[in-house]
Image (cartoon, helix red, strand yellow):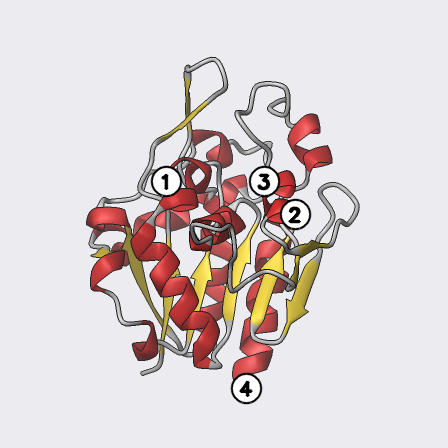
Amino acid sequence: MPTILFVLTGSDHWTLADGTRHPTGFWADEVVAPWNLFTEAGYEVEVATPGAVVPAVDAASLDASVAGGEEGAALDTMTPLLRPRAIADVDPDAYAAVFYPGGHGPMEDLSHDAASAALLTRALGSGRPLALVCHGPAALLATADAEGGSPFAGYRLTGFTNAEETQAGFASRAPWLLQDRLTALGADVQEGEPWAAKTVSDRTLHTGQNPASAGPLAQVVLDRLA
């Protein structure tokens, strides 16, 4: 059965500008919605994290008042989350597609993870779909070389915007903002309305702006695999 790789943060916190640790991890609905779409379409899902750490869910994403919050219980049935592989041990060529969910966790670890950067570079060159949503595109920052160049420079993409980070209450507390860093990487960042679903596709790279974009982004991947 064809398999899709989910690459998740291994961090349970995000270090803010003042040095305090904000509890976080992955955002539940950014895993649940794509996972359900992929498995219903006949794909298996495997999970990889830095060092094979069992990923932590951001408790805020399980709140019933948050979009997708009621879906949090579905995480209990997703046993691959409990037995992730180490990113460094993963061969992206073994998967039909690679998918990076968000949550603030990737800002803490995947933004500078060398193994993830190598996987992303190989996945980009494979010709198969590579998808990242919300804060997941923070992982692209790790692909910058010593001169600041990246294989993702010049690509059109999206991710969690400065406006959304401001409305979420973190822009003034963050050590850096994702939209700013992606722009500095050389990406052509496309910004939609805050919190509205938005996906951007450029060649084999597919990105989503925010949690509402996770399901639509997964459908884009399925359409490319059809």
Which residue bears the numbered disc 1? 109
Q: Nearer the viewer, residue 50 or 68?
A: 50
- Neighbour tally class for label 2: few under 14, some 14-19, many 20 plus, Cα within 10 Å: some
- Neighbour tally class for label 4: few under 14, some 14-19, many 20 plus, Cα within 10 Å: few
Secondary element type, mark 4 = loop
Of badges 4 and 1, nearer the viewer stands 1
Amino acid at the residue labelled 1: Asp
Which residue bears the numbered disc 3? 178
Secondary element type, mark 1 = loop
- Neighbour tally class for label 3: few under 14, some 14-19, many 20 plus, Cα within 10 Å: many
> Going from the N terminus, do you reach mark 4 or mark 1 first?
1
> Going from the N terminus, do you reach mark 3 or mark 2 first?
3
Mark pair 3, 2: CA separation: 9 Å
Above or below, comparing residue 175 to residue 205 in the picture? above
Q: Tags 1 and 3 in contact by the CB under 8 Å rule?
A: no
Secondary element type, mark 3 = helix
Which residue bears the numbered disc 4? 226
Q: Tags 3 and 2 in contact by the CB under 8 Å rule?
A: no
Mark pair 4, 1: CA separation: 33 Å
Which residue bears the numbered disc 2? 183
> Going from the N terminus, do you reach mark 4 or mark 2 first?
2
